[in-house]
């Protein structure tokens, strides 16, 4: 069986280092906001080439905390609208909603499956104050267009970089392409912890400070709350695990890219459409998403009968979710169309050449 992703296999490579760190962690006695968190924040800021990184409890909170902080800074207020691609993980929408802002779904480009920047002008209202590019599946959004639109319409740019650790646009990295960015280190991400973890990156010192304070009960001084804050801190032990894995992120991404290139070179089947990358963008292949003509479930069953596991990212876009009845009238035909055709095939860094060849052979024979 070729599993879609085997987290045990992925993490076994670091098992000795994890074990040693864990023993030190226990005897150290600092379990919250210790030196591992500080070290990870410094390392990850350096990795993303940003001035600041603030650890958070998870990726959803990272998104929410950015918007909450902008409200405190007076740059956003309750009811302001944020443009969000219709095709994304639900957390992108929830992070906006939870902060009291209104996410506005924007249809995707049929080739990249990322936000269709051409639709931004017609979606602007007097309340539109921010845009959230989501580098979905690991491909950076066309930031040239986002930067242009943000300037014309005076929008804040908040990246959802939860699937794009290390992906570049030009000479800049995801996390450093807007005003602030949210990362997740959920175990399945390209850089994954062994539990929940997230971070905010930014070059804005004021914003960084407020995000940090908000995530720790709104306290600048212990027991003195300046804001109605949250408890969303990066766990010390997760930071310790991430410090071990971060030096391997570029290697992990290069393996994923190598596997993707193998698929791109060798999958040849008129019923299968391969993913497209903008020539100005970069893709770290958090997912390798193909599109299937005809009955998708038949294709998935065929692969599963051949011991190849697949997943759909995502079967139901935000505007079709019961959680968002207010989106019932949203028109996002490209999202609806691709949603019925997409299939994610295995792409993780531990795949062997024989497995890749086997997957290609089976897909070509379909
Ligand atoms: C994983 C993910 C998140 C949320 O991260 P959590 O750590 O699970 O809260 C947000 N946005 C996108 C695009 C994601 O893939």
Image (cartoon, helix red, strand yellow):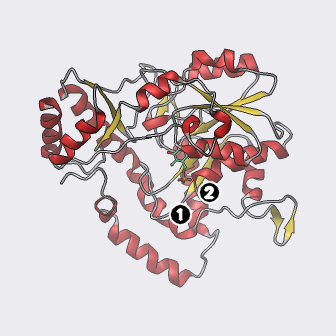
Q: Earlier in the sequence, mark 2 or mark 1?
A: 2
Relative to 190, 122 lies left or right: right
**In the rendered image, which residue does mark 2 sit on?**
55
Q: Are marks 2 and 1 in contact (CB under 8 Å)?
A: yes
Callout 1 crowding tier (Cα within 10 Å): few <14, some 14–19, many ≥20: many
Residue 255 visible from this viewpoint: yes
Residue visible at 29% across and 48% down?
Answer: 349
**Quadrant occupied by the N terminus:** bottom left
**Other-residue count near label 2 (Cα within 10 Å), few / some / many at <14 / 14–19 / ≥20:** many
In which quadrant of the rendered view does residue 9 lie?
A: bottom left
User: Which of these two is toward me, 197 or 366?
Assistant: 366
Does residue 269 appear left or right of residue 186 in this picture? left
Mark 1: secondary structure: helix
Q: Residue at x 40, y 75 (%)?
A: 20
* Residue for badge 1: 239
Return the residue nearer the eye: 172 or 197.
Answer: 197
- Please give the name of the residue rendered at 62% of the width and 27% of the height, measured from the top-left corner: 330
Residue, far bottom: 27
Residue 326 location, x and y as percent? 68, 36
Q: Position of residue 171 (x, y in %)?
A: 50, 28
């Amino acid at each position: 069986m070729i599993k879609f992703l085997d987290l045990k296999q992925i993490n076994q490579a670091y098992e000795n280092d994890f074990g040693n760190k864990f023993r030190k962690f226990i005897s150290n006695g600092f379990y919250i906001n210790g030196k591992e968190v500080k070290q990870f924040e410094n390392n990850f800021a350096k990795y993303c080439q940003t001035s600041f990184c603030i650890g958070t409890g998870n990726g959803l909170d990272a998104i929410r905390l950015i918007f909450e902080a902008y409200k405190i800074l007076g740059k956003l207020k309750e009811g302001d609208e944020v443009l969000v691609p219709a095709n994304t993980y639900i957390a992108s929408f929830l992070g906006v909603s939870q902060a009291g802002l209104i996410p506005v779904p924007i249809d995707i480009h049929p080739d990249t499956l990322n936000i269709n920047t051409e639709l931004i002008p017609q979606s602007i209202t007097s309340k539109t104050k921010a845009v959230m590019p989501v580098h979905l599946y690991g491909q950076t959004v066309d930031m040239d267009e986002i930067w242009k639109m943000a300037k014309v319409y005076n929008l804040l740019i908040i990246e959802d970089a939860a699937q794009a650790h290390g992906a570049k646009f030009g000479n800049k990295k995801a996390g450093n392409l807007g005003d602030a960015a949210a990362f997740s280190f959920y175990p399945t991400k390209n850089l994954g912890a062994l539990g929940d973890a997230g971070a905010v990156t930014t070059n804005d010192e004021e914003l960084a400070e407020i995000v940090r304070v908000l995530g720790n009960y709104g306290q600048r001084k212990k027991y003195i709350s300046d804001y109605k804050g949250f408890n969303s801190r990066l766990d010390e032990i997760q930071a310790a695990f991430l410090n071990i894995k971060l030096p391997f992120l570029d290697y992990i991404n290069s393996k994923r890219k190598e596997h993707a290139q193998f698929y791109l070179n060798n999958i040849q089947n008129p019923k299968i459409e391969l993913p497209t990358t903008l020539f100005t963008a970069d893709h770290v292949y958090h997912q390798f998403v193909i599109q299937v003509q005809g009955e998708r479930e038949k294709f998935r069953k065929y692969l599963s009968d051949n011991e190849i596991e697949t997943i759909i990212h995502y079967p139901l876009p935000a505007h079709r979710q019961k959680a968002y009845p207010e989106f019932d009238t949203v028109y996002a035909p490209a999202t609806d169309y691709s949603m019925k055709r997409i299939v994610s095939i295995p792409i993780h860094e531990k795949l062997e050449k024989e497995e890749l060849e086997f997957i290609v052979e089976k897909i070509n024979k379909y």
